[in-house]
Image (cartoon, grey):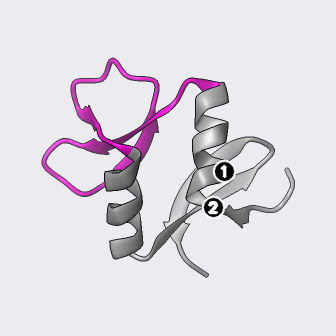
Amino acid sequence: MPALKQISFEYARQIAAVKGLQPSKVRGTNTLRFTKGGSEKLQVITWDEFERTASGRDLAVYESGGWMKLMRRH
């Protein structure tokens, strides 16, 4: 697998749109996830809230081959 590289939130939106993913958080927490929906444990949120929460927690989106992961900024 190629190395993970940090991507912009805008590019993450584009990848998510292609893959049918939405930004979400685990209910009752600030833990962020990407979801296709349907889980009662996850609450779909706006991209603005997703970006604000991630930035406030010093998280960035990293990508490798279309696979995305939220991690602390390097």
Amino acid, disc 2: Ser
The kind of residue on which mark 1 rests is Tyr
| Mark 2 element type | loop
In this rendering, would 53 be left or right of 63?
A: left
What is the magenta range?
19-46
- The residue sitting at 69% across, 43% down in the picture is 67
Contact? badges 1 and 2 (CB < 8 Å) = yes
Q: How many marks?
A: 2
* Relative height, residue 55 to residue 36 (above, below): below
Residue 11 tag number: 1
* Secondary structure at numbered mark 1: helix
Q: Quadrant of residue 15?
A: top right
Q: Which residue is mark 2?
A: 8
Residue 56, disc: none
Vertical side of 30 occupied by 34: above or below: above
Compared to residue 30, the image places residue 57 above or below, namely below
Q: Position of residue 39 (x, y in %)?
A: 30, 23
